[in-house]
């Protein structure tokens, strides 16, 4: 459970039986970001267009000004730390899309991310409770890198989900204690997000919890797995790395899979990621489905291409739940500059609201921009 919130706000929420959760998309603290942190690892890369992680730092420097290297562990989070202090979430969950290792056994897959284990306090600076590891970069430095990633996070008191030293461990939920009971986080990945099928965890092999497909049979298998762990009063988050990096379209298979999990009564929140930009939101049977949360921390600043998606903009998702049901969903619009998050200005927040409202309207959900510059799902105005 995360601490440090205004006591009155937290107490009033608890009195109503409510819990607020911080969710975001991809936290990519490897490669360029690792190089600006206090303990950078070996910058050597094996990419077609870059041979050193420092190349990405140089791109960011040219775009918005020199980054004050080395930065503090708090630096990349920037204004997100202030927003977390105000929102006082009872659980903080991210998709950590990097290996945390000094291994040199790199996978030949084109792009490889790793953060030095001594930079794990960067995650602690935001009091992250759970890192979901079911994604296409956690094993960029092979199975040895995955095992060191797990050990490094556990040593820092951060729970994990979606990868492990065996299939059972990869399937096991992260169990987070909150003032209102347990929150279970199940991490899963799909091949359509770029996860190699060879990375699947088996009985005797470390790996990722990789779903074979998004069929009804696979959904029922997930439901059965959740049922083995869920107790009365638990809140369950299904965290899914699925789909491609660009584009707003949501495949029918993704929507059907999410609906089936919620229809079962076993899953309360769908936390989707992989897309480099936010995608539409659906409120289905009073449960939140975030189909794509977009990138959050990365080293893409200065890389040209896909400007129409505004990859420099990101969102903090702060759903408030009552027994798993969505009470409200507030989002904080942010912009990355000099590898640091800062509050988006009015024009940027308006752009995000218009895009998210347009895409969410296809799913029966409205998104408003509040007078104080936040985005909110308009619960009373949902399309029926």
Image: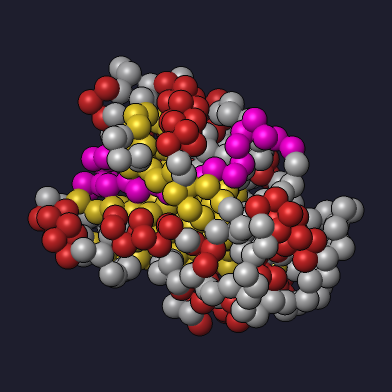
Residue range corresponding to the magenta coloring: 305-328
**Is 53 situated above or below 367?**
below
Q: Is residue 55 left or right of residue 261?
A: right
Quarter holding residue 199: bottom right
Residue sticking out furthest to the left:
15
**Is 219 situated above or below 379?**
below
> Does the magenta-highlighted stretch encompass residue 310?
yes
Q: Is residue 37 left or right of residue 317?
A: right
Numbered disc total: 0
Q: Which residue shows up at 77% across the image and 66% down it?
A: 54
Q: Quadrant of the N terminus?
A: bottom left
Q: Which residue occupies the foreground of this view, 286 or 300?
A: 300
Q: Is residue 178 left or right of residue 364?
A: left
Where is residue 94? Give x, y as percent: 48, 57
Q: Which residue occupies the foreground of this view, 144 or 351?
A: 351
Q: Which residue occupies the foreground of this view, 83 or 242?
A: 83
Q: Which residue shows up at 21% across the image and 63% down it?
A: 6
């Amino acid at each position: 459970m995360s601490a440090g919130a205004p006591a009155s706000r937290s107490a009033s929420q608890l009195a109503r039986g409510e819990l607020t959760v911080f969710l975001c998309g991809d936290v990519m603290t490897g490669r360029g970001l690792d190089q600006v942190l206090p303990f950078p690892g070996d910058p050597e890369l094996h990419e077609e267009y870059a041979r050193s992680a420092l190349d990405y730092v140089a791109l960011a420097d040219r775009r918005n000004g020199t980054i004050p290297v080395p930065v503090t562990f708090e630096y990349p989070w920037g204004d997100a730390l202030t927003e977390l202090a105000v929102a006082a979430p009872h659980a903080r969950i991210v998709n950590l899309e990097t290996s945390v290792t000094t291994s040199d056994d790199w996978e030949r897959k084109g792009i490889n991310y790793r953060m030095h284990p001594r930079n794990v306090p960067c995650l602690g600076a935001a009091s992250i409770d759970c890192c979901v590891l079911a994604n296409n970069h956690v094993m960029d430095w092979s199975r040895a890198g995955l095992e060191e990633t797990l050990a490094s996070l556990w040593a820092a008191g951060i729970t994990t989900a979606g990868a492990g030293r065996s299939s059972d461990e990869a399937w096991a939920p992260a169990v987070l204690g909150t003032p209102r009971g347990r929150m279970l986080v199940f991490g899963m990945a799909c091949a359509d997000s770029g996860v190699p099928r060879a990375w699947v965890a088996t009985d005797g092999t470390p790996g990722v919890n990789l779903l074979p497909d998004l069929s009804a049979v696979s959904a029922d298998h997930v439901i059965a797995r959740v049922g083995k762990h869920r107790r009365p009063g638990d809140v369950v988050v299904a965290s899914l790395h699925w789909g491609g990096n660009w584009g707003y379209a949501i495949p029918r298979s993704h929507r059907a899979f999410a609906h089936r999990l919620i229809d079962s009564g076993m899953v309360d929140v769908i936390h989707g990621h992989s897309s480099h930009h936010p995608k539409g939101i659906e409120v289905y049977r009073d449960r939140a489905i975030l189909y794509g949360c977009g990138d959050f921390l990365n080293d893409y600043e200065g890389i040209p291409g896909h400007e129409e998606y505004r990859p420099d903009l990101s969102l903090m998702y702060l759903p408030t739940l009552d027994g798993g049901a969505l009470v409200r969903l507030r989002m904080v619009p942010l912009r990355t500059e000099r590898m640091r998050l800062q509050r988006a200005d009015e024009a940027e927040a308006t752009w995000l609201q218009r895009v998210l409202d347009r895409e969410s309207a296809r799913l029966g959900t409205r998104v408003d921009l509040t007078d104080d510059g936040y985005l909110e799902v308009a619960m009373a105005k949902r399309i029926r």
